Amino acid sequence: MTPRLQIGFRGRLIAAMVALAALISLVIGALMMVYLFEDEQDRAQEQLTIGARVTSEVMARRRALELSRLDVVVKDFGFLSAVASRDSATLDSALENHSARAGADLALLLDNQGRVMASTLNHSLSTTPEALLTEARQKGFASWMVVLDDVGYELLAVPVQAPGLRAWLLAGYRLDNELAGIIAELSGTRVLFRVHAKNAPAFPPFATSLDKPLQNDGPVETPGLAFNAHYFTRTIDLGPGNDEQLQALLLISREASLQNYYQRAVETGLLVLASLALAILLALVLARFLGRPVLQLADYARAIGDGETPEPPRIVASGELRQLRNALRDMLARLREREAHIRYTATHDEVTGLANRTAILEAVADVFAKRRACTLLGIRLDDLSNINDTLGLELGDRVLESTGERLKQHLPTAHLIARTGGREFLALVPPLETEAMLHDAVQALHQCFEQPLQIDHTPFAIRTTAVAMQLPADAGSINEFRRRLNLTFDRAHKGGESVLRYRPGLDENHLRKLQLIGDLHQAIRDDQLQMQYQPKLDLRSGKLIQVEALVRWIHPTLGFVSPEEFIFLAEQSGQINELTACVLRQVSRDARRWANTGLDVGVAVNLSAKDLTWNDLSDHVARAFGQWHQPMDRITLEVTESALMEDPDKALATLNRLRDLGVTLSVDDFGTGYSSLSQLRKLPVQELKIDKSFVLDLDTEPQDQLIVRSTIDMAHGLGLKVVAEGIEELASWHLLRRWGCNLGQGFGLSRPVSADALAETAAHLATRIDELTQTPTENP
């Protein structure tokens, strides 16, 4: 069995360097050859492009000159007289003389229908000139390339016009050697004209600037740039003829270019061979000096990459290899330091030196994975933001450091103490088995911070909130742990409790809110919200005047959701404007439907505080009630006192825009907010709505009677109408009626009803008019 040839590192290095040098040399040589060929081709391409433009220019100028001559002919009085005579001999003589004056090689005179009247040809054209005449009629002249007796002509058609006379003069100009010579001289190329006939084996030239016959042994027939052993060529189509194509062929000789190309090729080949020989010699020298130390450095780098800490190799040679060895050694040292620093910073807080959020989450995840019980204690510094704002961030950091030190002193047996946020600290301690032990531990943690922190010998008292959880009993995953911990802190803060232990079920309300926020968007988009309407009656006549629109939501899985709940969530989640727009559209649709059935009522819509800062509110109101069938003041928009006070300036601007639309503006729940009479006087409102808390027991509460009666008098004094809501007793109705209240609503009159049931409710209320307008015998 023949042993395999083993090639060492230096042999492979030599082979690689030689192969690389050979490849580079060949590539350079090939690129040079390609470059030389492309350079020759590009120069020919450029010259032929110029030649093509020159050809087009010469043909255009020649055509313009011929047209100017023909224009003189067709305006000549003698020629026009001859044409008008219609005499054949006169026409032939005039056509021959005047065409000669215009330098035409052939001429025809046609009548307006295209029939030949006279001709200098011995035979007729092989094709009808109808297309030529059509073009001439459109443009005032026409040019046409034709072939007669294997010779190409440019045929020009111009009109012959005089009073009562209309004919056409066709003059043909031969594409001859003289024209080819002019183009050749101007463009620096050789030129020939030829006929390209269909299915013809060859294309014989009929005019040329060449001194000798064309040597055609290659693809010179291809349009555009082509070449063979003798010429670079470009074919120019001069235009369609009668079943034949006239072409101009531009040629550039390749003889001088090929000679130069072959000389450069030889020089390039010699240069490639010399470079290859030099590369082989250099590879032999370098392989001897670089082989051994390079292999040593490779082994050293491989060990570093494997995570080892090897000894650096001994490099005898100086210079770059030794520098590389030293660089690898220093890199290894810095790499180990950086890895240690990264591991530390990834799991430790920069300010306190305690573990950070990542470390505590990893520890909690390990608790869940191993089903190991432990207790989590948390502390939050309530005053940290105030300290940072008033005393500076540096002192705030000192507070955090002191807090960390106190935690370590108070919880010496803790598995892990971490700062997980700006003002939050958590500690994992051994499990506390009973609730009493857990309560004592979290109380002790809170009491630990009741003693002021000593910072630079200055005591700092700081308020804290302490919480506790049992793991994994109170949370089974990282997501549950984080959510329930935050909920516990938030519950303690909102409830004003300084110590709180997590209780199961605390996050159910949070999850319900998240579900409602998500589902509310779809309910608004899909018109799943329902509208109910509570009637408002005129206290003087007892008639139904208006209905208040009340939005309701029946959730597919949660059932009835109170308006207070989902409207609050809409405000918090930024969906309140979308909800208001949806209500406006639905109320408008219902009102138009009522009007079509003969039910004439106004509508009232409640606005949120967020709506008053919505710049597009007035546009949405105008769009929703664009087809409103009644005066705009039958639309009432109700806003609460508290909504007006949140941003008075912006609310006032919004109310003014709404007032400009002509709608009625009402202050809802009046008497429960903080608006003053001076502020009320400045608002562009036309109505006050007394809160139901003053009306529910109006018939039995003297204080409520005093407040309501004085409010009605005050509102009327300001020129405002008054609406009372919450009327449940007939006695309250009569009191309000006697005091001059304008409108009233409440369960004692009618509960809110659906849009479909409003007509029936209106009919029922009409039966109570006598009861409502009859003056009672005794006044309460």
Image: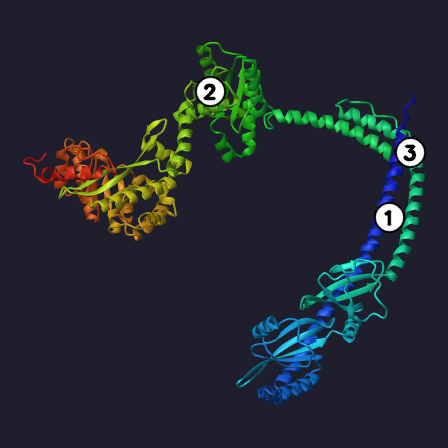
User: Separation of disc 2 and disc 3 at Cα?
Assistant: 72 Å
Which amino acid, mark 2?
Answer: Val
Quick one: 300 or 325, which is closer to the camera?
A: 300
Quick one: 59 or 383, which is closer to the camera?
A: 59
Residue at the left extreme of this rendering: 777
Residue 425 sits above or below residue 142 on the image: above
Residue 168: where, in percent of width, then height? 60, 79
Residue 406: where, in percent of width, then height? 54, 20
The disc at residue 29 is 1
Disc 2 or 3, which lies upstream in sequence?
A: 3
At x 67% / y 68%, what residue is drawn? 241
Disc 3 designates what residue?
287
Residues packed near mark 2 inside 10 Å, few (<14), some (14 to 19) or many (20 plus): many
Quick one: 706 or 621, which is closer to the camera?
A: 621
Apparent side of residue 226 relative to residue 389 in the rendered image (left or right): right
Res 363 seen here: yes
The disc at residue 467 is 2
Apparent side of residue 298 relative to residue 729 in the rendered image (left or right): right
Specify the quadrant of the image occupied by residue 613.
top left
Residue 754 sits above or below residue 273 on the image: above
Residues packed near mark 3 inside 10 Å, few (<14), some (14 to 19) or many (20 plus): some
Element at label 1:
helix
Q: Which label sits in the foreground, 2 or 3?
A: 3
Quick one: 329 or 369, which is closer to the camera?
A: 369
Specify the quadrant of the image occupied by residue 27.
top right
Element at label 3:
helix
Element at label 2:
strand
Residue 345: where, in percent of width, then height? 63, 27
Residue 56: where, in percent of width, then height? 71, 69
Which amino acid, mark 3?
Answer: Ala
Specify the quadrant of the image occupied by residue 264.
bottom right
Q: Which label sits in the foreground, 2 or 1?
A: 1
